[in-house]
Image (cartoon, helix red, strand yellow):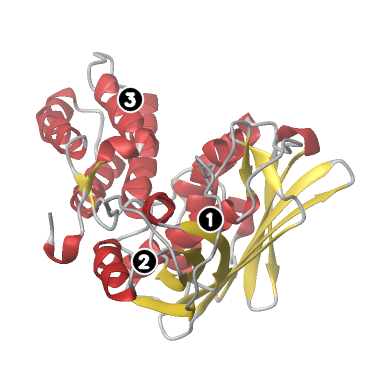
Amino acid sequence: MKQGGHMETSVDNTNDVKTLANEILRMFTIDEKDDDWVKEVQIKTHTLKGLCGIYGLTASFNHLKIMEKFMKVCTINKITINREIAYFKNILNNLLKEKSSGVQEGFTAKDIRCYKIVYNFSTVAAFENMIHVLNELTFITNIHVDSRKIVVEVLSQIPISDMKQMLFALGIVDINVIKHKKVSITKPKILKNISSCINCICYKIIFLHLLEMCNQFSKYTHKQFKLSFHSNVKHFTLEFWKDLKVPFMELIKNAFTHSSDDKKLRIIVNIVKIKGKLNIYVYNSNSKVKNGSKIFDYQYTTSKSEDLSGNGVGLFETKRLINGLGGTIKYRNHMLGVYFLMSFPNEKFSSTHEHVKL
């Protein structure tokens, strides 16, 4: 238990990290290590580094930067590769044990009175944990997103002094009484998972995932940002985030990598269903593309960033993943920045199932 009641959680909560790390470990057992092997390990290492970044696995993020840099410059020399692989295996095995920062654990109790709780969003996992705990402590009556803050209104019988003490363990310090009267209400047995139902995911949770990415990359680059999000599709299949997490991550990381230090970065994500297509626009300011014919080429880069740059791997892998999903990606310089357009057949990710409103 950390000071203030914050508790770290295991990387087991981020199965995509664990899965990818194990994939790379299996690749290290292959005897024939040719150019294609190096390329695939480099791409997977770059993706894994990005995922460690958005999940707050800082130690592994820093180690993977070294690993990625080596994989770019290494030649196919079996002795050299095998010597370094022992070091890389150690990095990946430690990653499987590393704990993520920023994910908090709470406790249970009973609740009642009317409180307005303002929660500073950090990660999706921490947010869902906060909702889980509030559901145990209170009857949740309303939730809405205000920029980077989550405003939750709840009913509870717990005095405000006790409520503050309990919620402090979740990192919540802004809590106020809206009303001070007893309310007769039947609390449901189970509040459905706020992030998704069995078959779909709410568009507002997509926004929170994107906000989490921006928060993490902002920490690494020390750059300020503003994220705007709009979608005329209200819920998606569960595969939407599973399949597009890495492309979104790469486009947002690319925005932070190429933006100027002295101006606030503006990122706009618009998801539009129109004419049988699902179009996803990701715009960022301050980073126009100068040589568009090579932007999706393997190992083409204009970045000078030491932290987030993938040395020309990120956009190459993004295009490969999107094409593999039956989609397309293109870019266009627009005003002071650039937008990327990912386009898919409409039926690819749209869901008609009911979902829990946020």
Above-or-below relation of 70 to 110: above
Drawn side of residue 321 relative to residue 98, left or right: right
- Mark nearer the N terminus (1 vs 3): 3
| Type of the residue with mark 1 | Leu
**Residue wearing tag 3:** 23
**Residue wearing tag 2:** 304
| Type of the residue with mark 2 | Lys
Give the x, y percent position of residue 195.
53, 46
Q: CA distance from mark 2 to mark 1?
A: 17 Å
Under circle 3, the secondary element is helix
Under circle 2, the secondary element is loop
Regarding residue 260, the answer to whether it shows in the image is no
- Mark nearer the N terminus (2 vs 1): 1
**Quadrant into which the N terminus falls:** bottom left
Drawn side of residue 57 relative to residue 317, left or right: left
Classify 10 Å Cα crowding around label 2: few (below 14), some (14-19), many (20 and above): few
| Type of the residue with mark 3 | Glu
Drawn side of residue 25 relative to residue 321, left or right: left
Q: CA distance from mark 1 to mark 3?
A: 23 Å
The label shown at residue 251 is 1
Under circle 1, the secondary element is helix
Classify 10 Å Cα crowding around label 3: few (below 14), some (14-19), many (20 and above): few
